[in-house]
Image (spheres, rainbow, N blue to C red):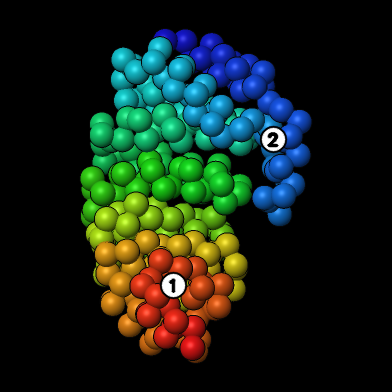
Amino acid sequence: MENNKIVRRISAALKAASTPDAKASFAKFFKEKVTGYGVKLTDVHKIAKKIFREIKEASTDGIMELCGMLMDTGNMEEKFAASEWAEMISDDFREKDFAVLEKWVKNSISNWAECDTLCNHAVGSFITKYPAYMAELKKWARSKNRWVKRAACVSLILPARRGEFLADVFELADILRNDPDDLVQKGYGWMLKEASRKHAREVFDYLMKYKKTMPRTAFRYAIEKMPDDMRKKAMA
């Protein structure tokens, strides 16, 4: 497998799929300057999936190396593709792969979409497989980097939706409860919202305990999926 050739191919395919409308939409969804071709997410999925068929027999190390090369380009759609490939091989993750995932989170993520795309799936899958690394997420939550802090929470979106790691969800929320960054608030509010699907009463009790001090952004996110009676009581 010639890594440089694969990277050039996916870059060319993504560039060819760009549209003016998709590129213009970046300004609507991001406060930050975004580097990207302007490709619809559905098209990124198709391209990543198509080219993955050609590399899927490569070693886990080989595919992770390719992902790292895409992460290093600075291009948003290429980072999306890398995140998808990492998720596709997540069943084969080894403990040593956490260092690589962490490097991407700390050095390559530059907006909420890149953060969520990588962490909702690849990092979340790693934590599900190796829950001892939850301690590392709690270190992330104390970072000075907004994306690392958001990553700590959005990595638990899918496990929390399944009802897993409730105590850890609350601990992360405790660490970040008064964070002034709205994108961090939305991240941990989203995590609590997903946890409420299986643990509505526990999340409700947690929110009511901190209702007077929790930022309204996080609070409103957290109650979105609660039963009507709980949501109305929380908003009263």
Residue at the spot 26% in from the left edge and 49% down from the top edge: 128
Please state which amino acid type lies under the numbered disc 2.
Ala
- Count of numbered circles on the image: 2
Q: Distance between the residues labelled 1 and 2?
A: 32 Å
- Is residue 34 found left or right of 201 in the rendered image? right
Residue at the spot of label 2 = 22
Residue at the spot 23% in from the left edge and 55% down from the top edge: 132
Q: Is residue 211 above or below residue 66?
A: below
> Secondary structure under badge 2?
helix
Q: In this view, does 119 lie above or below 142?
A: above
Residue 180 lies, in percent from the top left, at 59, 73
* Label 1 packing within 10 angstroms: few (<14), some (14-19), many (20+): many
Residue at the spot of label 1 = 223
Q: In which quarter of the image is the N terminus?
A: top left
Residue at the spot 64% in from the left edge and 22% down from the top edge: 17
Residue at the spot 26% in from the left edge and 41% down from the top edge: 95
Numbered tag placed on residue 69 in the rendering: none
Please state which amino acid type lies under the numbered disc 1.
Ile
**Front residue (pair 124, 131):** 124
Query: Quick one: label 1 or label 2, which is nearer the N terminus?
Result: 2
Residue 24 in which image quadrant: top right
Residue 74 lies, in percent from the top left, at 63, 35
* Label 2 packing within 10 angstroms: few (<14), some (14-19), many (20+): some
> Secondary structure under badge 1?
helix
